[in-house]
Amino acid sequence: MATQLVRCALAPDVSRGPPSSGRWRWGRCGGLLPGSSSSIMPGRQKQLLFSVCGLLGLSCALTAAVATGLPLWLRGAVLCRTGAELVNATGAELDKFVGELSYGLFHGQRVKQCGLGGRAARFSFFPDLLSAIPTGLHVTVIFFCGVVTLFSSVATGFFFFNAFGRPYKTLQGPVGLYLWTFITCVSSCLVMILFVSEVKLSRLSERIANFNEGNFIFQTYTERYDRCFWLFFLIFLLQGLNALLVRLAGIQFPFQQNKEVELSGGAADLMY
């Protein structure tokens, strides 16, 4: 019995990595042996970190779903250039020809000012503005918004599964945690880049303001991105924080075991 205890205490647990000189590592019975790293995180701390990651992922999924449908992506002003040129308006007089515009990915509202009072109207991108906007680019923005929502939800499920369950497949374990987080992070970044491209390069605000206008020409006066746009930037930051927390939990990337680890493990098993 004593001999078995000694062997058990001295036998290294090769599943925790190869021995390294000058440190301690865990034996098969929980004892510390020379060569182990003191940075191994206890199970309860990992559960806490993964639970926090899961809550952050759930917040990202809900935020992306709500922000996609709200008309609070861009707020700006449009100038009635035709009316302003007719009266040579300058300075404070331009205020009579500056209207308001706000929209999201599906609908919005505009107030046109041409010197005779404001004309308020609501509009929808589908199907009203399909002939006026860059449809392919706009649909791509909506698609990646859906990708952010979907993979944030997937990441949330797998974070909680890794915290309280026993993942047995690669994509359910460490590789999946990084993969779903990476996809969400990249997709949220693409949402912002594509929407900025649609607004600036395709002049989306002017297209909307001049839709079905025969007598007046409108041009963009001011533009600023509204809260829903910046919510996707917040999602990007939170997903980056999730990746950092996964790394703090002791999960490294890439997740391929070194062949030297396997060889040293086989030698240790034969020895004991």
Image (tube, rainbow, N blue to C red):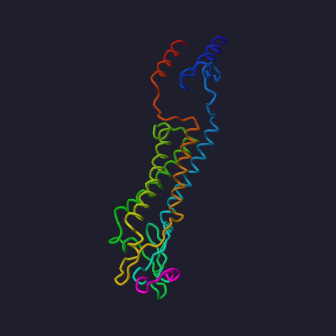
Query: Is-magenta flag for residue 30?
Result: no
Q: Quadrant of residue 146?
A: bottom left
Q: Nearer the viewer, residue 37 or 80?
A: 80
Name which residue lies at 55% across and 53% down.
58
Quadrant where the N terminus is found in the figure: top right
Q: Report the side of 265 relative to 144 (left or right).
A: right
Residue that extends furthest to the right in the rendered view of this protein:
2
83 over 166 or under it: above or below: below
* Residue at image point 52% right, 56% down: 233
The residue segment tinted magenta is 84-95
> Where is residue 71 shown, x and y percent of the image?
49, 69
Q: Quadrant of residue 24?
A: top right
Residue 215 position, x and y percent, is 35, 84
Q: Residue furthest left?
A: 131
Q: Main secondary structure of the magenta part?
A: helix
- x 62%, y 16%: residue: 10
Q: Is residue 90 magenta?
A: yes
Q: Nearer the viewer, residue 88 or 117?
A: 88
| Quarter in which the C terminus is drawn | top right
Question: Which of these two is toward me, 212 or 173?
Answer: 212
Q: Position of residue 158 (x, y in %)?
A: 52, 45
Judge whether 266 appears above or below 128 on screen.
Answer: above
Numbered disc total: 0
151 vs 69: above or below: above
Query: Percent x, y for residue 262?
Result: 47, 22
